[in-house]
């Protein structure tokens, strides 16, 4: 028998019954079991299938591979919906025999049927095997900037956590750090400038209002979907609101990423951050990020990451200001035919 012959592959939707086979393949690839992660991902997809695309490849031995993607409906400020490839895995004995390509084609066909124009993903700059596969599959380097920051257990960092204020007559770029006093003490943390709380369903109306002011369009469906996910699985979503004068003036939507893109450590992804323009330059964004890091430190999440469009210099400057820097991960894109 020709061992190089292509296996006879069938593509179908990933189901709950596939979980053990998926974990078995992933354990060989990663060298450890991630059963809880895959169980959460599959449960989220079954709860809200419109936000997830997950396919299985099978042969005469059972599960030969799998691909997991998330539907992008507004994350990272994107104006148009798309897909975000998060995991692809192939059983070792059929690697190099077209299983990954067949799974990717199923995902592209799904995107075409639903009107998604592009498929995006990220990969570590030194993951040579993944970079070769992405190139072979038609992905190109995207212009997006991936930035990240170590959580360090939520430890205090002055650039992120010190309170800031603007004296009269000063504009953006002239913020003064008054939180840091002599020695290592500080009078007030940035998160104390606003009443920062966990997001709840009752916050939807105000979040949509603020997002509309910033995005210039109504993204209620996107916000509502993320909020529902936060309520369904508090271990995945870590989303916050900030109040001043007892009114919601800012929000941050993030989720814990416990295994996407082949990561070996828990990472949180900031999908969206918004501040009411009337409350700009009053430390609301700093307050949200400061509280996020405190919460993630308690959850043992090690890094925070986000993706910023290259022309959004204001947002990129904000993230640099609170301690983010260019990531070791690169952003890739593939057009859906």
Image: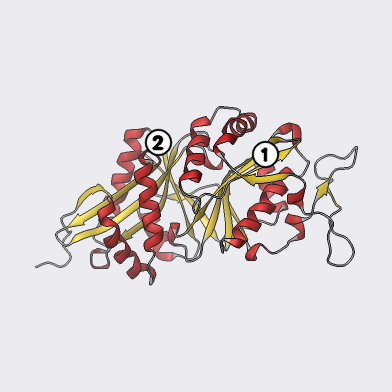
Q: In this orientation, which residue lies closer to the viewer: 65 or 198?
A: 198
Q: Are marks 2 and 1 in contact (CB under 8 Å)?
A: no
Expressed as whole percent of the image width and height from the top left, the position of residue 7 reads 17, 59
Q: Name the residue beneath numbered marker 2.
A: 116
Q: Residue furthest bottom?
A: 31
Picture layout, residue 282 above or below residue 35: above
Q: Earlier in the sequence, mark 2 or mark 1?
A: 2
Q: How is the image coloured?
A: secondary structure
Tag shown at residue 250: 1
Task: Work out how far the residue at label 2 is from the one at label 1, CA to CA, in angstroms.
Answer: 29 Å
Q: Residue furthest top?
A: 217
Q: In this orientation, which residue lies closer to the viewer: 262 or 47?
A: 47
Q: Is residue 87 visible?
A: no
Q: Is residue 232 visible?
A: yes
Expressed as whole percent of the image width and height from the top left, the position of residue 99 reads 25, 56
Q: Residue at x 60, y 58 (%)?
A: 296
Q: Residue at x 71, y 53 (%)?
A: 322
Left or right of residue 178: residue 59: left
Q: Secondary structure at mark 2?
A: loop
Expressed as whole percent of the image width and height from the top left, the position of residue 144 reads 55, 47
Q: Nearer the viewer, mark 2 or mark 1?
A: 1
The N terminus - image quarter? bottom left
């Amino acid at each position: 028998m020709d061992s190089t012959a292509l296996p006879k592959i069938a593509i179908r939707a990933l189901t709950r019954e596939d979980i053990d086979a998926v974990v078995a393949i992933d354990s060989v690839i990663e060298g450890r079991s991630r059963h809880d992660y895959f169980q959460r991902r599959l449960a989220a997809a079954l709860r809200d299938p419109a936000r997830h695309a997950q396919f299985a490849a099978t042969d005469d031995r059972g599960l030969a591979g799998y691909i997991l993607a998330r539907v992008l409906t507004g994350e990272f400020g994107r104006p148009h919906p798309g897909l975000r490839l998060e995991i692809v895995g192939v059983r070792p004995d059929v690697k190099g025999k077209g299983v990954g390509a067949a799974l990717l084609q199923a995902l592209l066909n799904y995107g075409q049927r639903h009107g998604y124009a592009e498929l995006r993903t990220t990969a570590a700059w030194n993951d040579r095997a993944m970079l070769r596969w992405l190139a072979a599959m038609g992905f190109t380097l995207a212009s997006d900037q991936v930035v990240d920051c170590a959580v360090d257990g939520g430890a205090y960092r002055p650039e992120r956590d010190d309170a800031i204020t603007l004296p009269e007559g000063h504009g953006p770029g002239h913020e003064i750090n008054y939180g840091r006093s002599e020695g290592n003490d500080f009078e007030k943390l940035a998160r104390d400038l606003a009443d920062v709380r966990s997001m709840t369903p009752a916050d939807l109306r105000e979040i949509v209002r603020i997002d509309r002011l910033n995005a210039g369009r109504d993204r209620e469906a996107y916000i509502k979907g993320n909020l529902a996910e936060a309520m369904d699985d508090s271990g995945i979503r870590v989303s916050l609101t900030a109040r001043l004068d007892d009114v919601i003036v800012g929000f941050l939507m993030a989720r814990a990423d416990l295994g996407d893109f082949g990561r070996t450590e828990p990472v949180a992804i900031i999908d969206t951050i918004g501040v009411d323009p009337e409350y700009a330059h009053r430390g609301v964004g700093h307050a949200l990020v400061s509280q996020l890091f405190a919460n993630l430190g308690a959850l043992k999440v090690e890094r925070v990451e986000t993706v910023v469009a290259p022309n959004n210099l204001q947002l990129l400057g904000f993230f640099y200001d609170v301690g983010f820097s260019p990531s070791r991960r690169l952003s890739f894109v593939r057009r859906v035919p």
